Image (cartoon, rainbow, N blue to C red):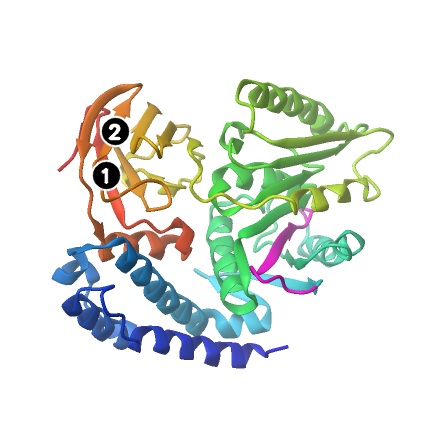
Amino acid sequence: MVKPEINRILLLFLVTSVVGCSTPNLLHSDIQKELEAWLALPVSDRAPIENLHFSKKPLTKAASEHVTGMLHKDKQHQLVYEFGEQWDSRQITYKGMAMPFYYQKFGDEPSDGRSLFISLHGGGNTKSSANDRQYENQKHLYDTAMSSLEGIYLAARAPTNTWNLWHENHIDDFFNLLIQLSVAMEHVNPNKVYLLGYSAGGDGVYQLAPRMADRWAAASMMAGHPNETSPLGLKTLPFALHMGALDAAYDRNKKAHEWKIMLDSLEAMAPGTYIHQVVLHEGRGHWMQLDDAIALPWMSTFKRNPTPEKIFWKQDDRHHRSFYWLGVPDNLIETGGEVVAEYNASMNEINILSNYSDTLEIYLNDKMMDLDKPVSVRYRGKVIGEKAVNRSLLSIYKSLSAKGDPALSFPSMLTVVKNEEIAE
């Protein structure tokens, strides 16, 4: 096994190699030279990339892919430089808060990278020592299930001891970091990241699964309560729900039954979406005696699609700036706001079915459609514009900066104003 310290050296070598390589016919020579010079500078000495003229010049498809690789390697290097020692010590500190974590590897690493199972402990609004015990229990809760699977099982300790310890605002930021570090340090495939949690951890999964659906391959909720959240954002995310049939506290079993009815109905109306596994385990109370462990092999059969053809984005009270290939400016985000949109690759067309925001950003990459041809945009079937798009380094940089995920980086963007026109 390669030690983390050596991992960082290898990563730095890879970044240097990518930055310094020559790629004839991929990038216009002046763009390549200026980008290499910019990446060679310490981060603190780099001019804002949006102020540099080369960042806005049009790129070819091949050049776009190459730039994405260069910027991703650079971002990984920065991340490991800043958080690598924290990863080694198994505790991430961010904005004054700390999240300890434990992980264990199971099975051999596949050629396409490892799976990652992020597991959330129970507890909640209680003494720190009680939550610590729950965390210790969660570390090995699913060892038997994982023994027949491949992947990294990572149990995290919530930074707080509140009732909503797994769906406070900072949790999304911590998981964004953990996912990126897992990719950089342990060769995790970002399309094979799974979320699960028990009791208060299940409360968190109910919330985090739909609001961060673009990061997960599948999610499993065990013995939790949904509170105010909605299943609508699970359109593109396989979701398992396991509950003891006798778990009556806070009406958890009744809520689980309600979600089963809702998910059954949603999947029936849109076959192939809202994929789910819901089991109310007969004779079991809050502790299901590991009957719920069947969710782990079920989840492992799925991989994330980072650019699904149709998405349902329901904004949570923890706001997100982007979701899959859609974005809304920070000042226009509304809690509960809904956007439903789809694209047709063969028609090179976007269709907005529902949108609450006066400004909607549509991010595009070459896996979605042909960016060398004009893209048509419709609102509820009516054409509101058709426009040629350019790929640019700046667009790639902005989208990659948010989540550090090449599959969620986009070289082109269209802006729709008031569902009536495409902004220039």
Question: Where in the figure is residue 284, as x and y percent of width and height?
Answer: 84, 33
Q: Which residue is mark 1?
A: 414
Question: Where in the figure is residue 417, as x and y percent of width and height?
Answer: 20, 30
Q: Determine the main secondary structure of the stretch shown in magenta.
A: loop
How crowded pointer 1 is (Cα within 10 Å; few <14, some 14-19, many 20+) is rated as many
User: Does residue 56 appear in the picture of this structure?
Assistant: yes
Quarter occupied by residue 269: top right
**Secondary structure beneath disc 1?**
strand
Q: Which mark is residue 377?
A: 2
At a point 34% along the width and 57% down the height, the residue shown is 401
Query: Where the C terminus falls, by quadrant?
Result: top left
Residue in front for this viewpoint, 180 or 251: 180
**Secondary structure beneath disc 2?**
strand
Q: Amino acid at mark 1?
A: Leu
Question: Where in the figure is residue 36, as x and y percent of width and height?
Answer: 24, 73
Tell me whether the residue at label 1 lies in contact with that at label 2, contact meaning CB atoms closer than 8 angstroms. Answer: yes
The vertical placement of 181 against 328, above or below, is below
Q: Which residues are magenta?
A: 108-126
Magenta segment includes 254: no
Q: Amino acid at mark 2?
A: Val
The vertical placement of 202 against 245, above or below, is below
- Asked whether, in this view, residue 54 is left or right of residue 133, the answer is left
Residue in front for this viewpoint, 19 or 179: 19
